[in-house]
Image (cartoon, rainbow, N blue to C red):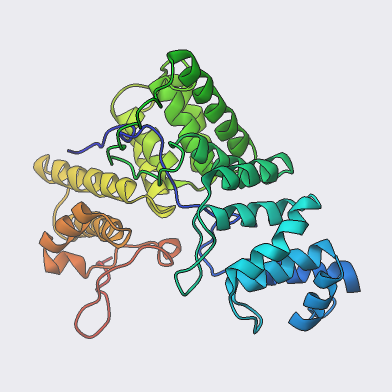
Amino acid sequence: DDVRPLSPPSLMVFFPTAHCFGAPQAAPQRPDSMRALDEVSSAMSGTGAEPLKAPDVKAQADGGHTLARLAYGLMLMEGQAGVKQDMQSAADYLRPACAAKNANACFFLGLMHDGLVGVDGRGLPRRPAEAGRLYRSACDLGVAQGCFNFAQILDRPPHEPRQLPGTPAPPPAAGSEKSDKEKHKEEKRVAKFFAMACSGGVGKGCVNLGVMHLDGYGGFTPSPLSALPVLQRACQMQEGTGCQFAGDLMMQGLVPGNQSHAAELYYAGCRFGSPDACLAQGRMLGKTAKEAVDAGQASGEAVLQAKARSVMFFRRACELGSAKGCQIFYKSNDGVKVIDARSEDEKDWLSVTPTIDGTPRAPAA
């Protein structure tokens, strides 16, 4: 089980829906409503102006100002700036903003119809067809994440919840089977919108488009060589799954590239949040350390440091939700776990287990 399958059994990788104001970052971002508030404040009072207060935004929104409707709708959706969360009222403000061709209003309204709920667990009735229409509008207006979400809706059966990778799809309803021609047409549509998302900078769209190239879905001829650059593009967008899949292709000899190239991809994938990439990196480091010992090329502290680096990647996989990563990490030697073998730029994302006094042991020079 050293290398995972190239693509999930469900063909496409279903990702949690993301916001459209930018890719997730390591540092916390301001809520979407507050960024929309900045936008409306700048539009109404000039760049650098103090943000408007919620009552002022509401007054402008009630007067028909589109950006104010977006900002106040998001305040209601998120419960920000002293405004009580109210999903129905949020939709009431976002709906006319979307009708006025505000792309973000259409996108967030789509999220609400796609199952987004408030802190009390309540939201709008889930209406996949309406969510799809709104995502498509956002996509047409330039929100690439809307293209991605629309593709995901196209790729799952109507009125069915998202299927996690590896989860068997429910049997089709009686009379719902489609002809091969209809299925082929729908697959091409899915590919079109994942491609639009990818071109618009959504790394998840590139991952799914790469998997489609790999598996011959959506009108593509199955081709690892065609899949590789698309997956590498996802990796460049800091989408860890893309790095991991590209590394898998190299390790399985399906595309040009050696173990060193694959290791670079797994390292990047781990840094960008792929637990499977962390697992692969940990295994490669452990294997390299063992081979060096067996060949008499390493001993002592150098071996401990190499093993410590391997264990840190298993810990990272565990932290990212990999049960296998946790299993390997907990079975590892406790003396190796506490060795800090990180470089300076790894200390903000790669953890080491501290000793009892809270200080990791640094390797000897």
Apparent side of residue 1 relative to residue 77 in the rendered image (left or right): left
Q: Nearer the viewer, residue 323 or 364?
A: 323
Please report the residue visible at 89 percent of the width from the left and 70 percent of the height from the top: 44
Q: Quadrant of the C terminus?
A: bottom left
Which x, y percent locates residue 40?
A: 81, 68
Q: Nearer the viewer, residue 364 or 216?
A: 216
x, y percentage for residue 173? 35, 32
- Inspect this view and state whether residue 98 appears: yes
| Image spot of residue 360 (x, y percent) | 27, 75
Q: Is residue 42 left or right of residue 137?
A: right
The tally of labels here is 0
Can residue 39 be seen in the rendering of this structure? no
Return the residue nearer the eye: 226 or 142: 142
Residue 41: name its quadrant: bottom right
Which residue occupies the foreground of this view, 177 or 277?
177
Identify whether 255 is placed above or below 238. above
| Spot occupied by residue 56 in the image (x, y as percentages of width and height) | 81, 80
Left or right: 100, with 206 as reference point:
right
